[in-house]
Image: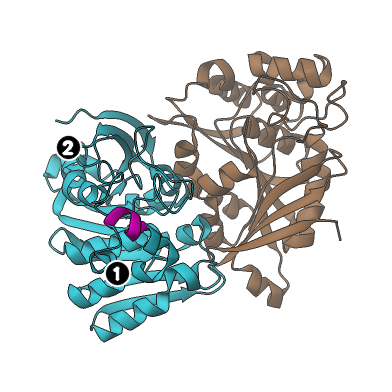
Chain colours: A cyan, B brown
Amino acid sequence: MSDALVTETALHGGRHLVIRHDSTSTNTRMELSVFIPPQAQDQAKSGEALPCLFYLSGLTCTWENAATKAGAQAYAAEHGMVLVFPDTSPRGPAVADDDEFSLGQGAGYYMAATESPWADHYQMEDYVIAELPALVAEHAPIDLNRLGVTGHSMGGHGALGLAMKNPDLFKSVSAFAPISALTATPWGQRALEAYRGGKDGGLYDVCQLMASHGWSRDILVDQGDADPFKDEHLMPEKLAEAAQANGIDLTLRLQPGYDHSYWFVSSFMADHIAWHAERLQ
Amino acid sequence: MSDALVTETALHGGRHLVIRHDSTSTNTRMELSVFIPPQAQDQAKSGEALPCLFYLSGLTCTWENAATKAGAQAYAAEHGMVLVFPDTSPRGPAVADDDEFSLGQGAGYYMAATESPWADHYQMEDYVIAELPALVAEHAPIDLNRLGVTGHSMGGHGALGLAMKNPDLFKSVSAFAPISALTATPWGQRALEAYRGGKDGGLYDVCQLMASHGWSRDILVDQGDADPFKDEHLMPEKLAEAAQANGIDLTLRLQPGYDHSYWFVSSFMADHIAWHAERLQ
């Protein structure tokens, strides 16, 4: 059992946990929330573990933004799915940071940093892939063979990239307004320069990963067509091109009138939860 | 047409409006949000106006807490209901305030203040009853004969009290963890002292209004049994007693394990929206 401190609140017939733990990946105290649906009570009798969806948040967010604003737990309670909301970076006074919101604390890009001063703590890729599944399994009855991943913006980039690199870990993937081509955006270029010395864009650019790794299952992506970051930072047309060029089954839905906020994310959360539930049965 | 400034965002197939306007009740600039469900597009053809539910928030809140955290718009979109989220008090540097969160800005108690320095702006009762319905009707296709009201904590007190005093305006009422007996709680006693000179508790105490005004329809109230404010400030047992003594059809549900937060409110929002929708058909 880990050193975790857990607080618990009733939510939608299930339980909302906030877990604080010392991460061996980031070498910091990390905080996340986990929703355990009411079906966990049946699970305690039947022994059948539940599917689990990781939600990776965007720039500036902690676990709290999506957990409080996306409405996801109501749908997860219907489908009997555990939800995990990790933080977006290591945090604290000893952790390197930047004045700009698109780098440093709140902006881990789900990458493994190799450069000083970032490498000491910015290990969000290992944190999500190698540390969190086992940690969550200590607190919730999840089936480690039925994990899915989704995310918003920087977290959509994280979800798509981590799934393609770890298809044995994540069996389903979707995204909301993802950063599709990290090497082509000012935000992504700056993050790659800082965290990886400007190298290894191919390990993190979703479009490049579609060519190098591919994805044998299907992908659902929603993108608001009134999203102010769409053209400069998200580039859904590049995602569509890369999917087509590499024979990947992408459903990309341009949603008329929707912006980049949680008003958008919450509007399509029901579809994404149902979509993952179907694929993780 | 009012002087309102409106911003609009797509949400759940409908529209989320933020309206800023100069209130004639409070003599301040006020802000609220309104959700217009997708059925308003049909309404534009059929001419049939939609039912509308007012949600009154609790201490410290603005419109934003419930609008972002309660998940209500998803359910309102299913039922074709307009939602209105007003602020909880007048605000601004010229508005009287108090160091304690339970009085002053963020704590209007949906009362009409008679005492200095509060009376100049603390006119939340008139604001909700006399000003908001017409203002909302300028921006959304609402049927003024099909208005309901609900609220949380201080806002549950507001919803129950305003409905009983205005049964021709509000045709349905429910509440989440309401302050049930304003004259019996430290928060309420202090507010009555400040805003009304310690007089007129009978005009604002929900239990007393059940005796003096009554309610000829039914009432739904949810209350978490792990709510830390339950015994000192909310007093659901007094509400149950007053309803029984006055022949009022109250369904009071004690929800095991739930606290006072929006985790609680969001968990039962679907039930309340459906309940109002049925009564406002």
Query: Which amino acid does the dot numbered 2 rest on?
Result: Glu
Mark 1 or mark 2: whose residue is earlier in sequence:
2
Tell me residue A264's x, y (percent): 50, 62
Closer-to-camera residue (B229/A148): A148
- Label 1, secondary structure: give it: helix
Left or right: A62 as drawn, with respect to B42: left
Which label was assigned to residue A21?
Answer: none
Tell me residue A162's x, y (percent): 23, 60
Neighbor class of circle 1 (other Cα within 10 Å; few <14, some 14-19, many 20+) is many
Residue denoted by label 2? A138
Residue A281 shows up from this direction: no
Measured in 3D between alpha carbons, the distance from the residue under mark 1 to the one under mark 2, in whole angstroms, is 31 Å
Subunit under mark 2: A
Give the residue at x 73% y 72%.
B47
Subunit under mark 1: A
Q: What residue span does the magenta drawing correspond to?
A: A191-196
Residue denoted by label 1? A206
